[in-house]
């Protein structure tokens, strides 16, 4: 066969179609969006229950015949000819390793066969993932139309399983089962980590999410707090999620930007995700563990998190409101640190070019100059029913909390010039900001995988990012209209060109969130604490308040923590610990076993709120790795205030 193959359209692109699964519809409210994106209950089927079975040819090899069996957790492949094998090599493809699927057809008009292709990222013997594409030839019928229907049936069933959609028991498997592609806004910090964020995004993230059928727009941030400014002016109803491609700092900006909005109560429910391309990837490490994957770093961690993002699914995310000494307030999804951890975090900034290795070097230097800090830590234990700081009918807020302005009446909808191609159809632009200033006639540039080559028609499948074989596979005309996607132009200030800009500096936080819920567990900072609080005073080497399980991609500081457990996990190390003992603690933290060492200086408490009062005149405080003003602070957990894109929980068990 000398003809090319073309990708078939796989999805119903009606923009008003609502989803009932884990990925992407345009709901009436952000709360509806979060609820709709929660994965549905698993179907009452055993992992080995056959859903589809059929015989196909292989591509590009000729003459081989394969028996395919699709189950809820894997695609089984058994070779029939030329030499039957009971268990051929590569004969089991776990769906946990599949990013997407598409159908294909030949450009040769005499070829009546149809094809479908699955994109997989299997783990190698050394743990890393590599992309692989498997293409199968449907040729059991006499006409192309019948073969096309069979290929589409298999591709649709695969995509339904990947997205958590139930398959009809005895009903027909048709394209109508698939909703429109989710719409993601990707924010990339090109200075992230060792400056490789853009390259990693282009080489790894964009191909995978295109294979999964996710529509996206991509913006490169130019400066500190740029992402915060962007989300303050976004029309959030146009997006099913905001995903940061960087370290933890960019997500900090996004969440605080959402809470800065007048409509923060709805805005903060916008699902957010993280694809780790920075030096600090703590939340990504927690997402990776939640997905059931082995601990990973670098590109391996990025591929794991990208696979989980492609599957969809979200969880509520606890946020910590932090009131600073000046009375200002910010919101944290990760940690508040004082002492050794914050010292290493900030002092290692000068080694940012080393990526995550900067923390290793910073730890060594910190151990060489180990300091102790005197302070007072007070906390409200998780098991204690809180006493109101003041009568409930007249509860005053801490001095940091400003009066919340009610959300204004909905403004008339902004008219956009819709883009009649999906973001995965267009050539890759040069690395530059992908956002136009207000009033600009230029639409928002959007990215694809096709380089400067011929345009590929087809919103999903990513068949054009690389030849799948020496006989390349190309797309066919779509069978349904494209989803419309609007450019972002409203509410964003004009931005300078990105060329020549220096990397962001590790300054203290800029604007502090003015919205968000009141801190009903906290009296004003400086006022006496209510009954039921516990206070510790003395010399500390470090104090860490952490929400998720991970402090770094490979540091499990609170192994029992969950994204939505409603707790802040307090860990502290008292003065008097030796350098060797502290080093052993951090080495054990890589496995989450540091609490089992029996270190007498190590303390832990689960709390709902806390207050930290440094008594040493000088020191460093950080919130989510960002330096804040030094002085007393207090914080309270707001359970489930945000929504985090996590993918499905756990690793689906491999079938025997």
Image (tube, rainbow, N blue to C red):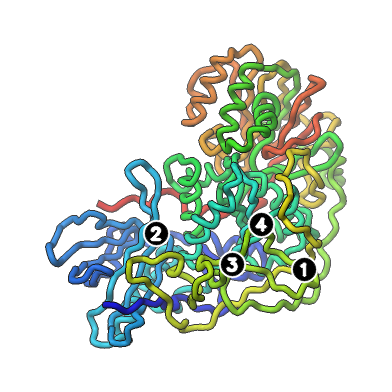
In the rendered image, the vertical position of residue 337 relative to residue 135, given as above or below: above
Image x and y of residue 320, in percent: 70, 42
Q: Quadrant of residue 74?
A: bottom left
Q: Alpha-carbon distance for marks 4 and 1? A: 17 Å
Image x and y of residue 255, in percent: 70, 51
In terms of sequence position, does the residue under pointer 2 or pointer 4 come before the other?
A: 2
Left or right side of 553 for 345: right
In the rendered image, the vertical position of residue 146 relative to residue 442, given as above or below: below
Q: Alpha-carbon distance for marks 3 and 4? A: 17 Å
In terms of sequence position, does the residue under pointer 3 or pointer 2 come before the other?
A: 2
95 or 397, nearer to the observer? 95
- Within 10 Å of the Cα at label 2, are there few (<14), some (14-19), or many (20+) other Cα atoms? many
Front of the two marks 2 and 4: 4
Q: Which residue is mark 3?
A: 183
Image x and y of residue 178, in percent: 46, 73
Residue 39 visible in this rendered orientation of the protein: no
Q: Which residue is mark 2?
A: 98
Please, what secondary structure does the residue beneath circle 2 have? strand
In the rendered image, the vertical position of residue 649 relative to residue 117, given as above or below: above
Q: Which residue is mark 4?
A: 220
Q: Which residue is mark 1?
A: 490
């Amino acid at each position: 066969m000398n003809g090319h193959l073309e990708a078939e359209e796989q999805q119903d692109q009606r923009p008003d179609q609502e989803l009932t699964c884990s990925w992407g519809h345009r709901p009436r409210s952000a709360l509806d969006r979060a609820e709709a994106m929660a994965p549905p209950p698993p179907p009452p089927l055993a992992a080995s229950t056959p859903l589809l079975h059929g015989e196909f040819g292989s591509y590009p090899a000729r003459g081989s015949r394969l028996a395919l069996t699709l189950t809820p957790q894997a695609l089984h492949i058994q070779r029939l000819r030329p030499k039957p094998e009971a268990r051929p090599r590569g004969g089991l493809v776990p769906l946990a390793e599949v990013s997407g699927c598409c159908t294909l057809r030949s450009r040769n008009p005499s070829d009546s066969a149809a094809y479908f292709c699955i994109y997989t990222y299997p783990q190698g013997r050394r743990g890393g993932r590599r992309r692989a594409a498997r293409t199968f030839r449907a040729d059991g019928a006499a006409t192309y139309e019948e073969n096309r229907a069979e290929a589409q049936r298999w591709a649709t069933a695969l995509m339904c399983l990947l997205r958590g959609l139930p398959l009809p028991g005895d009903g027909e498997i048709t394209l109508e089962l698939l909703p429109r592609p989710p719409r993601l806004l990707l924010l990339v910090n090109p200075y992230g980590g060792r400056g490789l964020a853009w390259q990693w995004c282009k080489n790894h993230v964009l191909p995978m999410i295109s294979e999964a059928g996710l529509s996206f727009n991509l913006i490169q941030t130019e400066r500190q707090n740029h992402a915060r400014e962007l989300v303050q002016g976004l029309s959030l109803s146009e997006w099913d999620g905001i995903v940061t491609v960087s370290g933890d700092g960019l997500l900090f900006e996004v969440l605080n930007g959402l809470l800065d909005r007048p409509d923060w109560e709805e805005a903060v429910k916008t699902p957010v995700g993280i694809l780790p391309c920075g030096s600090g990837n703590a939340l990504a490490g927690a997402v990776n563990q939640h997905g059931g994957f082995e601990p990973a770093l670098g590109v391996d961690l990025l591929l794991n998190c990208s696979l989980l993002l492609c599957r969809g699914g979200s969880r509520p995310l606890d946020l910590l409101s932090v009131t600073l000494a000046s009375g200002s307030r910010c919101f944290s999804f990760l940690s508040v640190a004082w002492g050794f951890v914050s010292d290493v975090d900030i002092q290692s900034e000068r080694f940012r070019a080393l990526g995550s290795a900067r923390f290793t070097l910073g730890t060594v230097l910190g151990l060489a100059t180990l300091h102790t800090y005197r302070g007072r830590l007070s906390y409200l234990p998780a098991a204690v029913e809180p006493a109101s700081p003041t009568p409930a009918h007249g509860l005053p807020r801490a001095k940091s909390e400003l009066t919340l302005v009610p959300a204004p009446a909905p403004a008339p909808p902004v008219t956009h010039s819709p883009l009649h191609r999906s973001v995965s159809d267009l050539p890759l632009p040069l690395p530059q900001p992908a956002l136009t200033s207000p009033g600009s006639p230029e639409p928002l540039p959007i990215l694809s995988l096709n380089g400067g080559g011929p345009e590929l028609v087809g919103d999903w499948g990513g068949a054009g990012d690389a030849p799948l074989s020496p006989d390349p596979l190309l797309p066919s005309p779509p069978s349904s209209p494209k989803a419309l996607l609007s450019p972002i132009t409203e509410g964003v200030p004009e931005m300078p060109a990105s060329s020549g800009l220096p990397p962001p500096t590790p300054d203290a936080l800029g604007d502090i969130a003015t919205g968000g819920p009141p801190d009903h567990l906290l009296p004003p900072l400086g006022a006496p604490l209510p009954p039921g609080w516990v206070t510790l005073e003395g010399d500390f080497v470090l104090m860490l308040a952490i929400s998720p399980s991970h402090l770094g991609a490979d540091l499990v500081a609170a192994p029992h923590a969950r994204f939505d457990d409603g707790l802040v996990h307090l860990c502290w190390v008292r003065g008097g610990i030796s350098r060797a003992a502290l080093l052993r603690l951090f080495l054990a933290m890589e496995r989450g076993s540091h609490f089992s060492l029996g270190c007498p200086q190590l303390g832990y408490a689960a709390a709902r709120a806390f207050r930290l009062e440094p008594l040493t005149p000088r020191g460093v405080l950080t919130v989510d790795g960002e330096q804040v003003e030094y002085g007393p602070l207090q914080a309270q957990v707001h359970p489930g205030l945000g929504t985090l894109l996590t993918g499905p929980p756990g690793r689906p068990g491999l079938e025997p």
